[in-house]
């Protein structure tokens, strides 16, 4: 937690991320830079920046998608903090009900052979808390490694005391408003978890046709050598018409559900079945009459036989049909996916897909089986367990979202809530305009237990808690004591005569997450934090959870606090691998941010592929790619390079196809930054900066050169561009502008231009040298502050090493992270708004074209670096003054001994090399005595001697009989390209030989 003493050791010769990033994070935290007092906000109109982190699951570790979130969010946070706004970035983790319970259950079985039911609820929950305390801190360590400047003193966990209180209050308020109720409905059911699950926990797989899949909850199909079960087929079978020889043929992809059929529907206008309207079918396996009903909504009479089997308890469409026609809802599956007694004696106890096989055989034996055909279909899987989901009718708690969704849509439509990019507004409206009530209960143990108690009188029998007729017996309360008081009123008897039984279920994880923007500040209590920091400013997250989290936060915020929880939503792109595939553990393509920050061996990358679920062929392909991309593994890049690289990708559209090699490239940028500053420091060892260099001394100076004005102008441009990028959430543009300033303007141009100036310590050069030193110091110091929100560690390290630290007055900041951010707003403090000079930049652009021509001429005549040359630059009158003003700069960068602008044509020798830059500019270089023409001609003729046979052989090959007919198009194309390349090479060599011969002749005159 102590400040790193950068004066204790000289700057390392090369950039080492681990050494640079080792101490700053703990010092920043110790100094309290990440926190913010409620008293810092003195009025509602005051500009502030408050944001909550999208709480990652406590079970996991961060992947590169999280790292992109962290990079974007922390960049904005550090930027606002440096702008002087009261800034607060709240961290937290999500209890992740299903994921956490699953992990601990697996661990329990592995270590003790026990299930959670063996332990009992209380003991099991103790184990989960132990696991959370031991392993749940991995994410916070990763966030610290990324340099995320969250206020750790306000860290929240969605099941801590403060968040839990908010959950109970929200549940009660919604119930009291009539928005929360209990009902039997159809939803996604995981037989493996024995719980309802939310839509976001469903992953879909597309089956092209007949497909065999492993089902982990089953013992295995004995008819398949790998024990897999068949999916992706449409099975047809017949129902006999009661009292007739006639049958109706129906088809299904889930044959076992026929055990729960309670009707067959036909279209009312279908003439084939008019005579059967109102009649019944006989179920072949259970004592049940099945009515033939008419339904124009569900039935397409042109599809198949025009008859549809109806299983209201096990299919969403059939469920709606069943409600329309008042059909019986017969549930034939147990919670773990076995056939129950209502599915018939013959199949009771069989797991659902074993029953599928048995039903097919039994139908065949009765002569009712009519075959099956491959069928494209979409299969829903539980993302947590991998189990194939069942539509199931169960009693659950629901939140009526209709009015809340309407308000949430209205806030976007009237501009109160801004969604960036705006294209995602369509998705917002599509989901919320078509919203369904939200099932918020889960049949788990880990999570917020539902604050509802079922009340019965002591000794009372026959009052079933799952009978919807007894729903009034469910008492929602803030605690058991309150529930008992309500029960006394409801049952009109004293507490001693009442038995209360709390609901075993827990709330959907997203329920507590939806409260996060205000629960973190202490809601429902009216705390100072809630008054100061709520509503927050921005919600930044991935677009994949726009509905599941963002919309629910907006709905709950409006309903429970009557204000929007934030006024802007910024949705970043999804991170995919370079092949465009989703990052997934099963594909083996998930990269841990720490693997990029600290480096990773090739062996560990390959081992991850072996541990995935890719087909063997794909594994080998991926391994080949990994070996080609990272023959030595992923080098240590550091957090800064990772953050900077990820921000660069945000210029893309919806998805980021992430090539790690590009991120590795930004380590080289950090290295360049390091080397440029280290190089510059040698020029600044005797320079004493002041706090008013940029605002007073340099603007008033009459001695700063054009090159100095140029870099200050480019700095101003970069400051404006980076700020505009941040304001408009265009992080790729901001990153690109900062990168370009440092590499293209400062390193490639300005540092090279000032070398002769700063090396010259003569008295006559004193003023010019001071101007260059002052401009260089300002450019680096301001440039580091410009970069800091994006790459915090290396900028702090380099900023602390600049000369003058601790001597710049009372207003000098101790850390770069609390130093003022560069702005071009013309306001007080330090700003660069007066330094933009477009004319100087245009002049420098011309000069750089001339320099490029000088370098090109030297290269074409193979002039050695140590040999300086004379250049004759011919320019149009309109730019002559600007070019003359930078004659010294042309000489410096072009490696010229003398540079003459618009010299008398008679003084220009004939032995010159010429480069026509454009219609306004021509550069000539005197080459007399600098080139041994005979040696150069000999080299070129030797090269020509090797190239001509290659050209002739290829021409002969391509002109041979049958070449056009017998050679593949791909090879012909390759040969054509090679031919053109050889012809160009021969032409270039012959032209160069001719040029040297002419010059030799001129020089010999």
Image: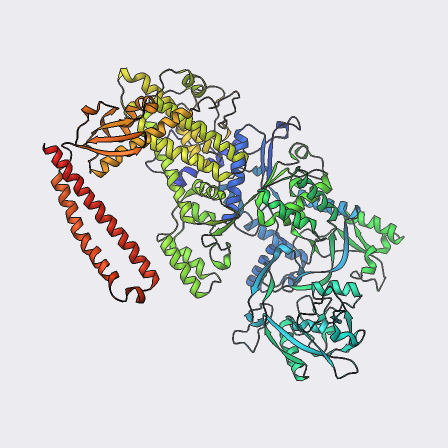
Residue 327 drawn at (x, y percent): 79, 67
Q: Is residue 478 visible?
A: no
Quadrant including the C terminus: top left
Q: Name the image quarter holding residue 464.
A: bottom right
- The residue under the point 56% across, 59% down is 107
Q: Position of residue 703 (x, y in %)?
A: 35, 16
Does residue 523 appear left or right of residue 573 in this picture?
right
- Report the front residue among 457 and 1003: 1003
Instruction: Count the numbered circles shown.
Output: 0
Q: 250 or 795: nearer the eye? A: 250
Q: Which picture quadrant has residue 394?
A: bottom right
Residue 698 in sight from this viewpoint = yes
Give the residue displayed 58% in from the left and 68% down from the top: 215
Q: Position of residue 957 (x, y in %)?
A: 24, 62
Taking the image as shown, residue 452 lies to the left or right of residue 636, namely right
Q: Is residue 113 positioned above or below 426 on the image?
A: below
* Residue 176 to residue 99: above or below: above
């Amino acid at each position: 937690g102590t400040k790193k003493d950068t004066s204790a050791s000289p700057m390392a010769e090369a950039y080492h991320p681990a050494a640079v990033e080792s101490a700053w994070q703990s010092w920043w935290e110790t100094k309290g830079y990440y926190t913010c007092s409620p008293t810092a906000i003195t009025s509602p109109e005051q500009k502030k920046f408050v944001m909550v982190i999208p709480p990652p699951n406590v079970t996991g570790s961060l992947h590169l998608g999280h790292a992109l979130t962290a990079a974007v969010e922390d960049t904005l946070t550090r930027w606002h903090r440096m702008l002087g706004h009261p800034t607060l970035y709240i961290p937290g983790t999500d209890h992740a009900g299903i994921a956490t319970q699953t992990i601990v259950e697996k661990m329990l079985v592995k270590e003790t052979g026990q299930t959670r039911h063996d332990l009992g609820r209380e003991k099991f929950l103790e184990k989960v808390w132990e696991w959370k305390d031991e392993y749940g801190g991995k994410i916070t360590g990763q966030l610290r490694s990324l340099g995320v400047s969250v206020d750790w003193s306000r860290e929240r966990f969605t099941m801590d005391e403060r968040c839990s209180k908010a959950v109970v209050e929200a549940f009660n308020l919604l119930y009291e408003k009539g928005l929360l109720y209990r009902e039997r409905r159809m939803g996604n059911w995981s037989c493996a978890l024995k719980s309802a699950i939310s839509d976001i926990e469903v992953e879909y797989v597309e089956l092209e046709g007949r497909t065999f899949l492993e089902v982990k909850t089953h013992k295995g199909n004995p008819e398949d050598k790998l024990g897999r079960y068949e999916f992706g087929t449409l099975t047809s079978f017949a129902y006999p018409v009661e009292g007739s020889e006639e049958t109706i043929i129906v088809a299904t992809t889930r044959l076992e559900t026929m055990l729960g059929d309670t009707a067959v529907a036909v279209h009312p206008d279908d003439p084939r079945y008019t005579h059967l309207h109102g009649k019944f079918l006989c179920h072949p396996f259970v004592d049940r009459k099945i009515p033939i009903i008419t339904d124009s909504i569900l039935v397409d009479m042109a599809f198949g036989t025009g008859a549809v089997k109806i299983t209201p308890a096990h299919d969403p469409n059939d469920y709606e049909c069943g409600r329309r026609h008042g059909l019986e809802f017969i549930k034939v599956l147990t919670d773990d996916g076995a056939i129950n007694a209502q599915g018939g004696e013959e199949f009771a106890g069989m797991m659902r897909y074993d029953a599928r096989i048995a039903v097919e055989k039994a139908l065949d034996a009765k002569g009712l089986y009519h075959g099956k055909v491959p069928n494209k279909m979409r299969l829903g899987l539980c993302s947590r367990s991998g189990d194939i989901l069942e539509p199931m009718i169960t009693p659950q708690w629901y939140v009526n979202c209709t009015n809340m969704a309407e308000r949430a849509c209205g806030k976007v439509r009237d501009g109160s809530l801004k969604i960036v990019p705006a294209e995602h507004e369509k998705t917002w409206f599509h989901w919320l305009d078509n919203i369904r009530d939200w099932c918020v209960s889960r049949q788990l143990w880990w999570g917020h237990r539902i604050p509802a108690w079922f009340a019965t009188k002591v000794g009372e029998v026959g009052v079933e808690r799952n009978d919807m007729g007894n729903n009034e017996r469910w008492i929602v309360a803030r605690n058991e004591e309150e529930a008992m008081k309500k029960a006394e009123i409801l049952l009109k008897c004293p507490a001693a005569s009442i038995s209360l039984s709390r609901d075993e279920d827990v709330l959907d994880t997203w329920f507590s997450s939806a409260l996060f923007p205000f629960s973190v500040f202490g809601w429902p209590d009216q705390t100072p934090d809630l008054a100061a920091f709520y509503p927050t400013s921005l919600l930044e997250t991935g677009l994949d959870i726009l509905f599941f989290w963002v919309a629910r936060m907006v709905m709950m915020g409006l309903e429970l606090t009557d204000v929007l929880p934030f006024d802007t939503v910024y949705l970043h792109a999804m991170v995919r691998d370079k092949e465009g595939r989703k990052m997934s553990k099963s594909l083996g393509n998930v990269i841990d941010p720490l693997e990029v920050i600290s480096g990773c061996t090739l062996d560990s990358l390959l081992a991850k592929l072996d541990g995935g679920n890719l087909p063997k062929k794909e594994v080998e392909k991926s391994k080949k790619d990994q070996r080609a991309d990272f023959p030595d593994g992923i080098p240590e890049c550091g957090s800064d390079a990772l953050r900077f690289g990820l921000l660069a990708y945000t210029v893309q559209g919806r998805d980021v196809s992430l090539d790690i090699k590009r991120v590795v490239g930004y380590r080289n940028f950090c290295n360049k930054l390091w080397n440029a500053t280290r190089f510059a420091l040698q020029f600044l060892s005797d320079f004493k900066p002041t706090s008013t260099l940029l605002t007073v001394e340099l603007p008033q100076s009459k001695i700063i050169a054009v090159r100095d004005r140029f870099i200050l102008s480019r700095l101003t441009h970069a400051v404006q561009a980076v700020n505009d990028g941040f304001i408009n959430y265009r992080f790729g543009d901001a990153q690109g502008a900062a990168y370009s300033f440092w590499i293209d303007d400062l390193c490639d141009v300005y540092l090279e231009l000032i070398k002769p100036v700063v090396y010259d310590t003569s008295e006559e050069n004193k003023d010019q040298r001071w101007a260059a030193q002052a401009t260089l110091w300002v450019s680096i110091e301001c440039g580091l502050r410009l970069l800091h929100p994006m790459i915090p560690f290396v900028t702090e390290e380099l900023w602390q090493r600049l000369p003058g630290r601790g001597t710049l007055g009372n207003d000098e900041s101790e850390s770069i992270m609390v130093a003022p951010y560069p702005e071009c707003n013309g306001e007080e403090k330090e700003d660069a708004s007066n330094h933009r000079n477009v004319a100087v930049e245009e002049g420098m652009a011309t000069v750089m074209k001339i320099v490029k021509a000088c370098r090109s001429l030297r290269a074409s005549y193979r002039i050695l670096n140590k040999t300086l040359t004379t250049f004759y630059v011919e320019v149009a009158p309109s730019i002559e003054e600007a070019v003359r003003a930078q004659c010294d700069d042309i000489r410096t960068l072009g490696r010229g001994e003398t540079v003459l602008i618009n010299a008398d044509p008679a003084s220009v020798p004939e032995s010159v090399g010429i480069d026509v830059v454009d219609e306004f500019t021509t550069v000539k270089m005197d080459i007399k005595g600098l080139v041994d023409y005979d040696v150069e001609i000999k080299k070129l003729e030797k090269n020509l001697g090797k190239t001509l046979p290659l050209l002739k052989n290829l021409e002969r090959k391509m002109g041979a009989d049958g070449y056009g007919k017998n050679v593949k198009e791909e090879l012909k194309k390759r040969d054509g390209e090679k031919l053109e390349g050889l012809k160009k090479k021969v032409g270039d060599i012959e032209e160069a030989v001719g040029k040297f011969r002419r010059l030799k002749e001129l020089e010999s005159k």
